[in-house]
Image (cartoon, rainbow, N blue to C red):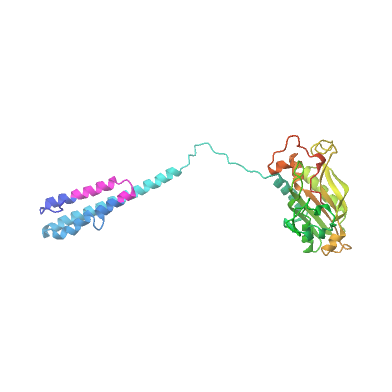
Amino acid sequence: MQPFRGVIGSMEDDVRTLWSAAKAAIEQAGDPDELERVRIEYLGRKGKLAALRRGLGKLPQPDRPVIGRLVNEAIADTEGAFKRKRAALTDAAAEAALEAERIDVTLPGRAPRIGTLHPLTESLHEMVDIFLRLGFAIAEGPEIENYYYSFEALNYPLHHPAMDEQMTFYVSDDVLLRSQTSPMQIRYMQEREPPVRVIVPGRCFRRDTVDATHCHTFYQLEGFMVDEGVTFADLKGTLNAFAKAMYGERISMRFRPDFFPFTEPSAEIALTCIMCEGAGCRVCSATGWLEIGGSGMIDPVVLVNVGYDPEKVSGWAFGMGIDRLAMLRYGITDIRALYGDAPVPGMATADGARSGHRSAS
């Protein structure tokens, strides 16, 4: 198109034709990229409307003001149309994005999947809470121990079967996976002067054959107290208060003589069978009692090993299998159910009521 034909009317027609074409192209642009191409074509530095403005100098002097005003009006109006179209496309894109993210609140709600704590965790929390209310502190120790803390400092004789490879997982000659939480007794008392009153929950490991009542990995809660004038009566009173808080006032506790290298005297702890309330059933082997752990007065040799004077202080210790207490609390008759293994038919019983965690702490 030749922009100017030497007649002012023809020049005005050319400007208006280009002006209309620019606005039509702007209105037809369907996205920001296409709109930008239209802007460059008509309003850019080398665009068609800009070319009209540059060509004003070639017009006769009398025609320049009329055509100049028309070109400026065309450019200003086209720029305004461009801005309005750009805003409209931006708003449309934003609206489309919001529409895509909109949630239909009229749809029925989706119930969230609610998780629950594992029975072992629930039982551990309850046990710890009870002992905290009884004035005990909490301590934790390493699961990989050495020979001294595991056996020697706890007064184990060299021939004790727990030190045999059939009972303990050894990493090396002097390093092993702890078979009980008792090593923490030594570690804790070595660093503190009496009085001490502590519980130690934790995971333990033994080379037990897995069955309805035994597992190679289990959880134990250790407890011990050392102070002046501590007696076995304090131990019985503490554990009796724990048992009633855990299982109710109707529960009874029994102590029977036993042996542990680090306590003297020592006693097995048993509770009234929760399944039959002491009447006798296959879970308690018709005895009416279920063993939950061991206990006793801390052997003076152990007190000497941690730097305490057994002539001035005395103490007691106990140990309970958290797995066993969880089974009693929830009526679980096969320990393998706690670890995701389905109980074997015909073995859903805790014959003998052994926890597999026979230690005083």
Q: Position of residue 118 (x, y in %)?
A: 68, 45
Asked if residue 250 can be seen in this view, the reply is no
- By secondary structure, the bulk of the magenta-drawn segment is best described as helix
Question: Residue 147 versus residue 132: which sits nearer the camera?
Answer: 147
Residue 145 visible to an observer of this rendering: yes
User: Could you say where residue 54 lies in the image, as x and y percent from the top left?
Assistant: 19, 59
Above or below: residue 84 compared with residue 172: above
Q: Position of residue 45 (x, y in %)?
A: 25, 58
Farthest residue to the top: give it.
346
Q: Residue 149: within the magenta?
A: no
Q: Which residues are magenta?
A: 16-35
Q: Is residue 271 above or below residue 299?
A: above
Q: Is residue 120 left or right of residue 99?
A: right
Q: Nearer the viewer, residue 181 or 345?
A: 345
Please give left or right for residue 206 compared with residue 56 in the image.
right
| Image quadrant in which you'd find residue 101 | top left
- 29 in the magenta segment: yes
Foreground residue among 61 and 168: 168
- Could you tell whether 158 is left or right of 34 in the image? right
Residue nearest the observer in this picture, 343 or 277: 343
Q: Position of residue 142 (x, y in %)?
A: 72, 57
Residue at the image position 15 percent from the left and 49 percent from the top: 13
- Picture mark count: 0
Residue 300, placed above or below residue 31: below
Residue at the spot 16% in from the left edge and 58% down from the top edge? 56
